Image (cartoon, coloured by chain):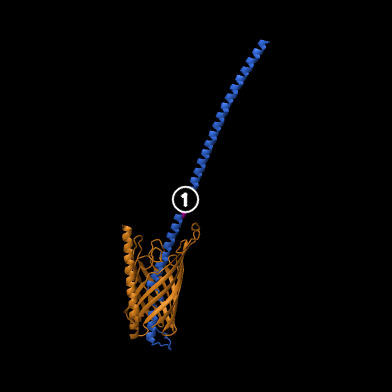
Chain colours: A orange, B blue
Amino acid sequence: MQIAFDNDFKQVKFLSSAAVFTYLFLSSVLMLPAISHADPKNTYFEIGGGFSTGDFGGQTRTNLYYINSVIGYVTQSYDLSITVPYPFMISDNNDSHQNGMMNTKNGIGDITLQAGGLLLEENMAGFSIYGSLSAKLPTADEKDGLGTGEADYGAFLDIGKNISNFKISLLPGYIYTGDSATQKYGDINIYGIGASAIFDQTYYYLSYEWRKSMFSDTEDPQFINGGFSHAFNTTYAIKSDVSFGLNKGAPDLGLKIGLVTWF
Amino acid sequence: MKKIIAATSISFLLFSSVAFARMSGSGHMMDTGHSQQMMNNQQSNQAGSQQMGNHNNMMGAGQSSQMMNGQQGSQAGSQQMGNHNNMMSAEQSHQMMSDHMMGNQTHKNMSGQMRKSGMTDDKSIKNQQ
């Protein structure tokens, strides 16, 4: 009875999430072109992919390959985006007792919604504050390990100061994690610092981030990441990013690349 | 002469009786011994069978136990992989959520800069943020 209720509840939750996503996605597809006519080059579509690998200090190494599609809308004072990932998860157990057992899973990942706004416009001293809210919807299959099966909500600040051509950012944030019926996840405090600069048509960035682990028995992830985005013109851009884990709580290496079109 | 024949006959009868008796006795003993041996052998066989049975049981139990352990190991391995998958997918999701991942900020920074600089398809973005 309880199991049937849980299954029904999960089904309702999944269908609700799917309905919300469908609504938002269709709204974006239908509305954004109209908005973009009013203010050209505010809407972008990104298609990309990436790779991430890590063993988190255990015997199992997980290699994650994924395809991402992002649709977003940006103005001077706010931005909106929806990210739909499709991950391919390959776990390889190096424990001799498991005889190198390999496990492959794929499916739609957790869809992410993000909205941000300018809280403090750049003042005379060069300071500005940009705030963002985001939600991770539980659209991925929890049983396959493609997601936690729960929604997470995050709030982030980018407290920036412009110095000449550079911008230095302090990056505090918080992610409220949903707990499943079988596992309690810890909420996540985030602290980061980054620097960015634009030269010609290329935007460069480098940042360090510390994050409290959502798993009680895992080190708090720390990593550095850097990358660039290059605009060929006002319509097309390419972006690439690399991250290195600094401890066992973070993936050892992450790479991603994306193609962006503005319309 | 008659006495000699009578004595010989009696001796023969006695000898025959004794011999028969001994043959019968030994036969019985032989039969008994053989039967005992056979019984022993049977018991031995039974014991052997029992031993083999036990051994088979041990093997079977051992193998089953090993299989169960292996299965449990596999389940534990799958569980471990599942946990790792969860960690990786959660990490990835949170990186996507996090506006701190400065790669996620490229769009608004590029867009803002394009707007500031009035960039067109023929113009570069100025070296300013």
Query: Which residue is farthest right?
Result: B1
Dividing the image into 4 quarters, which one contains the C terminus of chain A? Answer: bottom left
Residue A84's place in the image compared with A58, above or below, is below
Residue B9 in the image: state x and y as whole percent. 64, 15
Give the residue pinned by disc 1: B64
Residue A247 in the image: state x and y as whole percent. 45, 66
Question: In this orientation, which residue lies closer to the viewer: A67 or A202?
Answer: A67
Question: In this orientation, which residue lies closer to the viewer: B99 or B2?
Answer: B2
Give the residue type that dot 1 points to: Ser
Numbered marks: total: 1
Dividing the image into 4 quarters, which one contains the N terminus of chain A? Answer: bottom left
Residue B126's place in the image compared with A216, above or below, is below
Instruction: Give, as a single range, the part of the protein colored magenta.
Output: B61-70
Type of secondary structure dominating the magenta stretch? helix
Residue A160 in the image: state x and y as whole percent. 36, 78
The chain that hosts pointer 1 is: B
Residue A19 in the image: state x and y as whole percent. 32, 71
Question: In this orientation, which residue lies closer to the viewer: B87 or A146?
Answer: A146
Q: Is residue A13 magenta?
A: no
Question: In this orientation, which residue lies closer to the viewer: B30 or A221?
Answer: B30
Residue A53's place in the image compared with B2, above or below, is below
Q: Name the image quarter holding residue A43.
A: bottom left
Q: Dot 1, how many residues are within 10 Å of its Cα: few (below 14), some (14-19), or many (20+)?
A: some
Q: Is residue B111 visible?
A: yes
Q: Is residue A78 left or right of residue B82?
A: left
At horizontal 45% and vertical 55% (from top left) the residue drawn is B71
Query: Which residue is farthest front?
Result: B2
- Helix, strand or loop at label 1? It is helix
Q: Is residue B102 visible?
A: no
